[in-house]
Image (tube, coloured by chain):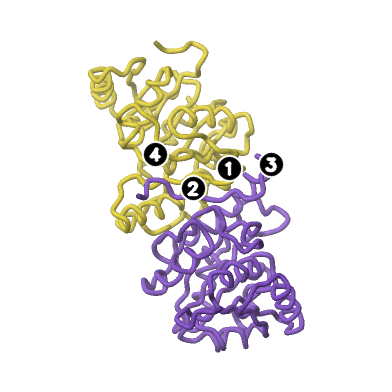
Chain colours: A purple, B yellow
Amino acid sequence: MSNANLPILSIVGGTGDLGSGLARSWSSAGYSVILGSRSIERAQDAVSLLKSEGFANVSGDTNAAAAAKSDIVVVAVPFSNYEASLAEIKDPAKGKIVVTAVVPLVPPKVSVVQLPSAGSAALIAQSLLDPSSRVVGAFHNVGSQKLHAGGKADCDVLVFSDDADARNQVITLADAVSNRGVDGGVLANSTAAEALTSVLIAINRKYKVKGAGISISGLT
Amino acid sequence: MSNANLPILSIVGGTGDLGSGLARSWSSAGYSVILGSRSIERAQDAVSLLKSEGFANVSGDTNAAAAAKSDIVVVAVPFSNYEASLAEIKDPAKGKIVVTAVVPLVPPKVSVVQLPSAGSAALIAQSLLDPSSRVVGAFHNVGSQKLHAGGKADCDVLVFSDDADARNQVITLADAVSNRGVDGGVLANSTAAEALTSVLIAINRKYKVKGAGISISGLT
């Protein structure tokens, strides 16, 4: 059952690996989740799969319609589709929290940090979305394997925003899919987590593991 | 007793907080450590303090002379002194491993990521040092409190270099002062750890702790 006290979530790029993994974990935690896609058919196919696996409170729509129906918009698209996706949700995301989980990977060298000239994907969202949208960076370093089983990722999730209330709301969302959300400060700090994704890809390759993540030590 | 099989280490900026902390831990682990400073008197004062506390195999010299006498040069100066320090060691560090622990913090907003136009302090070292120097980025996220007691920091140390042998030698040095060194890939990836330092400063402030660090999860 969905919990009517929880915000309704949309996931732009909800049919992708990270997006569909987050959808499973948030569904398991009682959130209503709307999977967005450029193609409504693909969104509905992804929803049918999730329902067949027992995940409840999931629906599908276009990215723009999913954003319009939700309280919090989560963007989980490949970097190559990022600016087009932000344009699709610019109007429906006005006044809403927009969480970007997008990492500026530049294929083929995805294990090498190659930050965009704007500094980070988070700062690109802030520059392209309406000023009334409250941009948050999070979920950059979440391995999706455990999410796909409907469980929590074995890592901490760093959460960045210039809006303290938005940051706290997303820390709660992070608590539902990982060991815990951790307040990482202002939006500009998202650079660190975005860059870390390439480091974790390098670590996965070097140590022959699948889901290296980060954990913050020294917190009680 | 120092171990003659271990490389001799110099620390440029060895009288600073991180540098003198690393000196204590490496001394405890049996390394010979030469503390470098712009002022030989300050280096010798710092050595006298360490000796009075029981740390052995430590000596002091100017930054250039310390680099000349060592096998591996560790740079641990404030970002404001970084380029001048690199100029001091350029000649004596030819052909040697040079480890930069320097973080590009921009006061007063040290809890905000503000990367240099070159991308990272590590890439600045690579551009200013002689091409025969093998540049490694490491020790960016090490809280110095535990080091000052001669113990190990409760965190992992990410180690970055384009030179695999240099990376492995510095991973061994990291194992001596932290939970473990972790191979983070190429030198360009140092950006992630350098940026993370501002995030950890933000976390220390937000959660009222002193030594937030990072640990890599998912490694066996």
The residue drawn where x is 37% and y is 50% is A219
Q: Which residue is mark 3?
A: A208
**Label 1 or label 2, whichever comes before in sequence order:** 1
Query: Residue at coordinates 30% horizontally, 46% vertically from top-left?
Result: B210
Q: Is residue A107 left or right of residue B207?
A: right
Q: Do circles 3 and 4 both sit on a common chain?
A: no
Q: Of callouts 4 and 1, which one flags the residue occurring earlier in the amino acid sequence?
A: 4
Q: Chain of mark 1?
A: B
What label sits on residue B84 in the rendered view? 4
Image depth: mark 3 or mark 4 in front: 3
Say what amino acid the circle numbered 4 marks: Ala
User: What is the spatial separation of the Cα atoms under label 1 and label 2, in whole angstroms?
Assistant: 9 Å
Q: Which amino acid does the dot numbered 3 rest on?
A: Lys
Q: Which residue is mark 2?
A: B193
Q: Which marked residue is nearer to the observer: mark 4 or mark 2? A: 2
Pointer 3 chain = A
Chain where mark 2 sits: B
Residue under pointer 1? B184
Could you say where residue B73 lies in the image, as x and y percent from the top left?
A: 46, 28
Q: Chain of mark 4?
A: B
Q: Quadrant of residue B77?
A: top left
List x then y, in percent, for residue B215.
49, 44
Mark 4 or mark 2: name the one nearer the start of the chain.
4
Residues packed near mark 1 inside 10 Å, few (<14), some (14 to 19) or many (20 plus): many
**Closer to the observer: label 3 or label 1?**
3
